[in-house]
Image: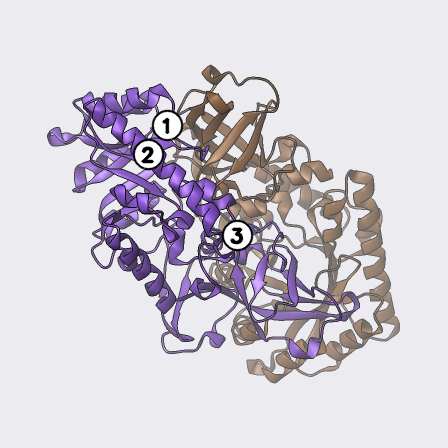
Chain colours: A brown, B purple
Amino acid sequence: MWAGQTLTKLPTPAFTVDVKVVQRNAQRMIDRFQALGVQLRPHMKTHKTLECGEIMTAGTRRCIVVSTLAEARFYADSGFDDILYAYPLPFDKVEECAALAERLEAFHVLVDSQEALQQLRQRKLANSKRWLVWLKVDCENGRAGVKHTDPGALELAKEIARQEETELAGVYAHCGNTYSCSGQQAIEVVAQSTTTSILQFASQLEKAGVKCPRTSIGSTPSCSHPVPDMGKLTEVHPGNYIFYDAQQMMIGSCKMEDIAVRVLTRVIGHYPHRNELLVDCGWTGISLHSLGKLPSGYAIIEGHPDLKLVGMTQEHGRIQPISGELDFSKFPLGSLLSLIPYHSCATAAMHPVYYIHSDGKIVGTWTPTRGW
Amino acid sequence: MWAGQTLTKLPTPAFTVDVKVVQRNAQRMIDRFQALGVQLRPHMKTHKTLECGEIMTAGTRRCIVVSTLAEARFYADSGFDDILYAYPLPFDKVEECAALAERLEAFHVLVDSQEALQQLRQRKLANSKRWLVWLKVDCENGRAGVKHTDPGALELAKEIARQEETELAGVYAHCGNTYSCSGQQAIEVVAQSTTTSILQFASQLEKAGVKCPRTSIGSTPSCSHPVPDMGKLTEVHPGNYIFYDAQQMMIGSCKMEDIAVRVLTRVIGHYPHRNELLVDCGWTGISLHSLGKLPSGYAIIEGHPDLKLVGMTQEHGRIQPISGELDFSKFPLGSLLSLIPYHSCATAAMHPVYYIHSDGKIVGTWTPTRGW
């Protein structure tokens, strides 16, 4: 219905994706890790669409990571395979995981506790198939995972490898601590430390005679600036890089021109008595994720470094100049503004449809999956 | 599929709604304004479901407010009528508004500028129907609306009433400034001030010979504790009261037992080395709206005043004790916790389906509309 029209025709707020930037971001990540001889297993959590999954896997529809079972089902239903559900095994979802494991060539799960391993062992797969189990290792990120220095980590890996019902598919670490970095050098320090930890852990496994075919680390900052030692991993699993965002630009993962997504919004009110204009994008359109901490507030207002998105309610955004008086004649009621999201995963999650364009011409729409 | 099962069977994270509490909240608001002789025009923006719209209108499916055109279409398509699209007229949506105005018995729009009025006049309705236009007045809330003290407000009202294509359906004020109140007395001060302002404005209109059949103010805090003068209004338009939430409890609008919604979540990780457990509810499950400012962090953890939801990522929530050591044996992996949202509008917006229960037994599911 929208194909062929210009972006300026869209009803707002609208989440737009520049498909050429998406393709370039995808290709660069593919090339970067091909050069290092490392398998890229892209994460789907940022966009949750089939089309973007296709682009990130260069059309193979193989070798992806997901964060929810809803994504796993969605991709499996559309012919994707070799899917890693990279989430501490939720005990209420073991049966559904088993169905996917029995149905797909390779459906991988992830554990970080003996209890989770027991859950898997209690649900034997049909046809003597074995659960493909990754051990989640925490290399100083401090979210899920057994600490890499904890002797229990090695024990658990051995257990997974030893049991009849399971096989150790790999070890997995998320270096989310790169998100507190500023600049390439800081990112590389975390990337190096995580890589070293995971490679040391794999080498301990090898010494203990435990076969572990895969080692993987991920995060968009680390994979945008890989350190040479990452070439010794078998896999990486970044996700956000497909869209990037203002946060990644501030971390140092990307440049402004790499950010593929925008929220288009229109001016709906002029309030000179408080030097403010109102736009039709509230937190349902862009999320509160920047916490207002950007110099420009809750988003970057493209082409207007003098403006600040100072606050939002459900469907309203309030924009003020960073200093001085607003020239309202430059922003007539009904005119468009383009917001660059702080956190594209969070902004995408608010939109039931994405409008895809190439050079400002709409080429189609993508529909993400939602829920769990 | 879920009817008859207990809540504890649900896959998590799950947004649950206690239908008895919803019905009680709805009935109390109906009774409260029936006693005052004021028409209740409930706002749909919090839940965006047909079922809840039915309950809030006591089955009449008449006289509602919506915040998006998607809601307007959704309710109109299901036999609702007398719908007020209480949003500063977006110029890209005039044609769709016209279609609704031509099709429904009463589709009301809202303006706060001469430019918006011109947009309406340029799109004449079929069959000499007139646009039903509300004037949005800003009574010190500071979002949309012409300031009640601005002579332009009276001028605009006169213009709407005078034009052939439009009729002045009412004057509308949102007292969102009640959200910064603490306690009933503070709420009543704002409710009184907004009511006084809107009634004075209406009396100025009357003196000027301008017919204005409706006066409406709204916000859940003010309508939960109406001041007697609100009986002189013709309408009120609260919305959040149907669910309430931790924020409303802190403002003083409701008590804990009035909060109808929860997010159920399961424990997915134990990390004693950092005195923390992980749950399967991240910001996609509950939103970041409390900004972590509650004593219990991003939500209230029901029945566990000693716990704090200290942080979230997309699909993970981190819980720590407020003080002391966590007794992990009380929270085995897979066990359920119940989170009371800080802002139910924001939490509901993250869920593609709501699970409805009565005394812990699931009685059905509701599916909200999304988008714009």
Q: Percent x, y for residue B327? A: 71, 76
Residue B192 at x, y percent in the picture:
38, 41
**Host chain of mark 3:** A
Q: Amino acid at mark 1?
A: His
Going by the numbered disc 3, the residue's amino acid type is: Lys
Label 1 to label 2: alpha-carbon separation: 7 Å
Give how far across and how far down residue A241 sits, in percent.
Answer: 64, 44
Read off the chain for label 1: B
Callout 1 crowding tier (Cα within 10 Å): few <14, some 14–19, many ≥20? many
Please give the label number shown on residue B262. Answer: none
Instruction: Check whether the beta carbons of the residues at disc 1 and disc 2 lie within 8 A of each other.
Output: yes
> Can residue B88 be seen?
no
- Residue B4 visible? The answer is yes
Q: Earlier in the sequence, mark 1 or mark 2?
A: 1
Q: Nearer the viewer, residue A288 or B304?
A: B304
Tag 1 residue: B148
**Circle number at residue B198:** 2
**Vertical placement of residue B368 versus A275, above or below:** below
Q: Is residue B69 above or below residue A127?
A: above
Q: Nearer the viewer, residue B129 or B160?
A: B160
Q: Position of residue A277 (x, y in %)?
A: 47, 26
Label 3, label 1: how far apart the Cα atoms are? 46 Å
Query: What is the number of the mark on residue A48?
Result: 3
Q: Which quadrant of the view contains residue B278?
A: bottom right
Quarter holding the N terminus of chain A? top left
